[in-house]
Image (cartoon, grey):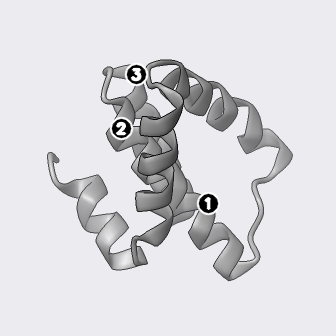
């Protein structure tokens, strides 16, 4: 599920929806921490590139607020958020 959220976040970042992307990245990180499932080395490069892209589109305060909001989501909320436009 965390991987799915990260992939959706990457798509959002690539389309210029940085706040939405950061919400999903934050939710994915919180889920990974809760489940003790860290990113695998092969997953890290793409995720870091997409997160850097999203972060570059936002000022620091907006990024921090979006990250905190994503981390506060339940897994169910994060999944619904990721699927909202699908």
Residue lying at the far front in this picture: please name it. 61
Query: Which structural element holds mark 2?
Result: helix
| Spot occupied by residue 60 in the image (x, y as percentages of width and height) | 53, 31
Provide the secondary structure element on which disc 3 rests.
helix
Query: Quick one: 15 or 40, which is closer to the camera?
Result: 15
Q: Residue at the spot x=68%, y=33% of the render?
A: 48
- Percent from the top left, x then y, of residue 14? 40, 21
- Residue on which disc 3 sits: 14
Q: Of the residues under marks 3 and 2, which one precedes in the sequence?
A: 3
Q: Which residue is mark 1?
A: 29
Q: Nearer the viewer, mark 3 or mark 2?
A: 2
Please name the residue shown 40% across and 78% down the image: 74
The relative height of residue 27 versus residue 58 in the rendered view (above or below) is: below
SS state under label 1:
helix
| Residue 37 locus on image (x, y percent) | 74, 70
Does residue 82 sit above or below 37 in this rendering?
A: above
**Alpha-carbon distance for marks 3 and 2?**
12 Å
Residue at point 77% right, 62% down?
38
- Asked whether the beta carbons under mark 2 and mark 1 sit within 8 Å of each other, the answer is no
Q: Earlier in the sequence, mark 3 or mark 1?
A: 3
Give the residue furthest to the left: 85
Task: Between label 3 and label 1, give the one nearer the viewer.
Answer: 1
């Amino acid at each position: 599920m965390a991987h799915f959220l990260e992939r959706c976040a990457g798509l959002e970042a690539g389309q210029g929806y940085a706040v939405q992307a950061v919400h999903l990245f934050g939710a994915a990180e919180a889920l990974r921490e809760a489940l003790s499932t860290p990113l695998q080395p092969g997953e890290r490069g793409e995720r870091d590139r997409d997160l850097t892209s999203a972060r570059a589109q936002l000022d620091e305060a907006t990024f921090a607020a979006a990250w905190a909001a994503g981390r506060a989501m339940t897994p169910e909320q994060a999944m619904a958020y990721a699927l909202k436009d699908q």
